[in-house]
Amino acid sequence: MDRINTSRRTVLTLGTTAAAASCFGATPAEAHATAHATPEPTALDELGVTELRRRMADGQLDAERLTRHYLERVERVDPLLRAVIEVNPDALREARRLDAEGERGRPLHGMPVLLKDLVETGDRMHTTAGSLALRGLRPSADATVAARLRAAGAVILGKTNLSEWAGGMSLTHHAGWSARGGQTRNPYKLDRSPNESSSGTAVAVAANLCVAGIGTETNGSIIDPASANCVVGVKPTVGLVGRGGVIPGVPSQDSVGPIARTVRDAAILLGTLVGIDDRDPATGASRGRFHRDYTRFLDADGLRGARIGVPRAVYFGYSHHADEIAERAIATLREAGATVVDPADIPTAGQLEDLPSSMVVQAYEIKSALNAYLAGAPGDHPRSLAELIAFNRAHADRELRYVRQDGLEAVHQLDYTEREYRQALATNHRLSRTEGIDAVLRRYRLDALVMPTTGPPAKIDLIRGDSYGGGASTPAALAGYPAISVPAGFAFGLPVGLTFMGTAWSEPTLLRLAHAYEQADRVRRPPAYRPADVGF
């Protein structure tokens, strides 16, 4: 659901003493760990799929040893971060099975991955959207993306925390907070927001708790936490990756995509996820447009001859730190051989950020999709949005301790006709597609647009909500078009990403450009786990 939010508020500093950790939802033991532990680096840190598979081929590593490594690291490090909401009790058994079967040409053989807690798995794990209302939900089958990951040889390591109900619960930002998982923290500075709503996945990938992970995005929920945690996030074209078995938000905008430490790893994961999904009619449009191997588009010299536009209106100016980092990145693009058209503004940018039709679409689709999901999901839990709201009120001491449910209540109360919805959706698409992204790409003959993903992460404020100054996500969100965030720099040690955005089905081009930029700048570095009382 992500950004149905309209209220942005100032933040309150919270320290990382044991008392402050308790405010973040930690147990006393976790609070003690937070106050005193700093994770030690390991020999496997920062290694990607290609390097790990090479070690397996050389006999230095196998799936069981790699899975055990990440499980032990989650046990040691995650009390500091609260990124992992649940560990798969069968992960080691899955790894042993893969070792017994052999590699068999599977692109993710033995690679432990984490899934956002919206993705159903037909095992002993729950799927809850971070809500206590769904804590008994154990689906009988994998979501399409989970099944495809397993078929590609991945080990499903566990589920990650998120902004409860993907940020749709409240009209204020409480990034990475859920009643079930507590508060996820940014590993670069522990009092900073992980951004929402694929918070736990981005943090876990950044902190080397897995090889890579899966997030979902409606508006910013992959690329924003990728930016805040110095990792790569790919928001695919709506319809490229099947959403069967994923708790829905706004289906006309929802995407499922990879979060990884490198563009190459993100491309490898994306190739395993794509294809027609019988449970998701939107994937029919991807026929003939998806690729099983996106790594073939990667080229370290891929910026040479590219035409890249810089949309300044709206997407610059909200953070001078983000602007400075983006300017350096743009200079790198030029040095690497790209033609940069600057400015190349999206004609409708101002309209898209405060669009009445957007609220109509979100309210209509969330209500319809969530009611349908709750009615059909197995188990003893609320069967409708109204029952979910009532459950939260009945468990207000835990569910509503910090976060109001004014987002869910607003969606429940708003009542639009199908005609009003169809008109609003057409307006969204016209302004974001033909008169928006496609218009500027066509006018300047561009391959892609680039802009800062969002500003440096704000401080966590459970009382008033995190502040949010601006970001790049809305045009691609409303259009259903792809976007990729790549690490671009740091402001006082806090990460900021650069977003590459394009037209529908342009993932090959965006991955090529993002990879070439990544190779030219090499910004990614592991987190420092700085406590709140150190520096900025």
Image (cartoon, rainbow, N blue to C red):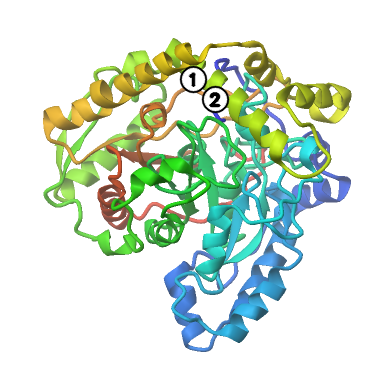
Q: What is the quadrant of residue 74 in the picture? A: bottom right
Q: Which of 445 and 415 is in front in this view?
A: 415
Query: What amino acid is labelled 2 in the image?
Result: Glu
Which residue position holds label 2?
365
Q: Which of 131 and 277 is in front in this view?
A: 277
Mark 2 neighbour density, 10 Å: few (under 14) some (14–19) many (20 or more): many
Residue 85 in the image, given as x and y percentages of width and height: 72, 49
Q: What is the quadrant of residue 44 in the picture? A: bottom right
Specify whether 301 is left or right of 199: left
Residue 220 seen in this snapshot? yes
In the structure shown, which secondary structural element does the residue marked by tag 1 occupy?
helix
Which residue position holds label 1?
361
Q: Quadrant of the N terminus?
A: top right
Mark 2–mark 1 distance (CA, rounded to whole Å): 6 Å
Q: Do the residues labelled 2 and 1 touch (CB within 8 Å)?
A: yes
Residue located 73% across and 20% down the image? 404
Residue located 55% across and 16% down the image? 6
Residue 52 in the image, given as x and y percentages of width and height: 49, 74
In the structure shown, which secondary structural element does the residue marked by tag 2 occupy?
helix
Number of dots carrying numbers: 2
Residue 84 in the image, given as x and y percentages of width and height: 69, 51
Residue 431 in the image, given as x and y percentages of width and height: 31, 19
